[in-house]
Amino acid sequence: MAKRKDHGESPDDQHTFDESSSAESSSDDDTNMLDVEFEWFDPQPEHDFQGLKTLLRQLFDADAQLFDLSALTDLILAQPLLGSTVKVEGNETDPYAFLTVLNLHEHKDKEIVKSLIDYITRLTSGNSNLSPLMDLLKLDSKACIGLLLSERLINIPSEVVPPMYKMLLEEISWALEEQEPYSFTHYLVLSKTYKEVSSQLDQEVGTSSKKRKKQKMASGQRSDSSEFHFHPEDEVLQRHASAYGGFDYLKQEAQGHSDSKRAFQDLGIKPQGHLILIEKDRFQPAVREMEEYFHQS
């Protein structure tokens, strides 16, 4: 069995979070409290395959069908001493969150990595915000890019993320002492954002003109470029980035799909992909700021 991860904090304050939700009942003061103890583990091939594959499908969203997610999951699990999973009921359960890094140069001959590089190259082509990434992806480039993949189930608190990044830095340091191929010049975060869009569903079912006007005003208060992060930690990482930018998924969902992603609000949600490029020397300060940010919030 894998050894439970230890990231240098006392047992009393490192794993327990309060999940609170307001109950729509007879009293506004009724609150459901749930104490959840999270544990960090190394990736485990015998336990984590299906859970990681599900999280990868969620991360790539509409473009997940472009990739062999089984092969990608196998590659992640092939480096069990690098990266972390987060669980709540012991090592033999499915992960609720994960973080890993893949060496795009070291694995460039693997089909799944070829497809990832081709995908990123297509996304950066013509995107001025991501133009620095184009030269780094060329075959004759001296750059060594670590592709950071991280995802978690909805409602898993962001506070589980900084420990995974802190442990990843330590694991990379240990790997370099063993002459393993993790001497990155850059880190590339593949993540997600979303935009709020006017509902198509309400128009189809004959929403009142008053409500449509309200929706239009709400969407008009935000510019077309307004993006919101699914992962709050990305806001911190961007502050240390040499380049970042969003992109529409190559596989577009059917009209009205954004309405399936709304809950108790007038506007629908349109997910988008997001890339954040961080130079090696800026990665550790970014992780440090991330820890401070979530410690204060």
Image (tube, helix red, strand yellow):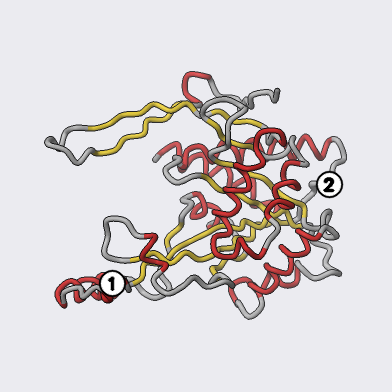
Q: Which of 247 and 96 is in front in this view?
A: 96
Q: Nearer the viewer, residue 236 or 25?
A: 25
Residue 87: image location, x then y, percent: 55, 32
Residue 268: image location, x then y, percent: 35, 66
- The residue pinned by badge 1 equals 221
In the rendered image, the vertical position of residue 286 relative to residue 227, given as above or below = above
Crowding at dot 1, Cα within 10 Å, few <14 / some 14-19 / many 20+, comes out as few
Crowding at dot 2, Cα within 10 Å, few <14 / some 14-19 / many 20+, comes out as few
Is label 1 in contact with label 2 (beta carbons under 8 Å)? no
In the rendered image, the vertical position of residue 157 relative to residue 148, given as above or below = above
- The residue pinned by badge 2 equals 181
Residue 171: image location, x then y, percent: 72, 36
In the rendered view, does 230 fall on the left or right side of 130? left
| Quarter of the image where the C terminus is located | top left
Residue 154: image location, x then y, percent: 45, 46
* Residue at x-position 21% and y-position 75%: 206
* Residue at x-position 43% and y-position 73%: 225
* Residue at x-position 73% and y-position 69%: 118
Q: Quadrant of residue 22?
A: top left
Q: Which of 129 and 51 is in front in this view?
A: 51
Q: Which residue is outermost to the bottom? A: 126
The amino acid sitting under disc 1 is Gln
Q: Distance between the residues labelled 1 and 2?
A: 48 Å
Callout 2: SS: loop
The amino acid sitting under disc 2 is Pro
Q: Earlier in the sequence, mark 1 or mark 2?
A: 2
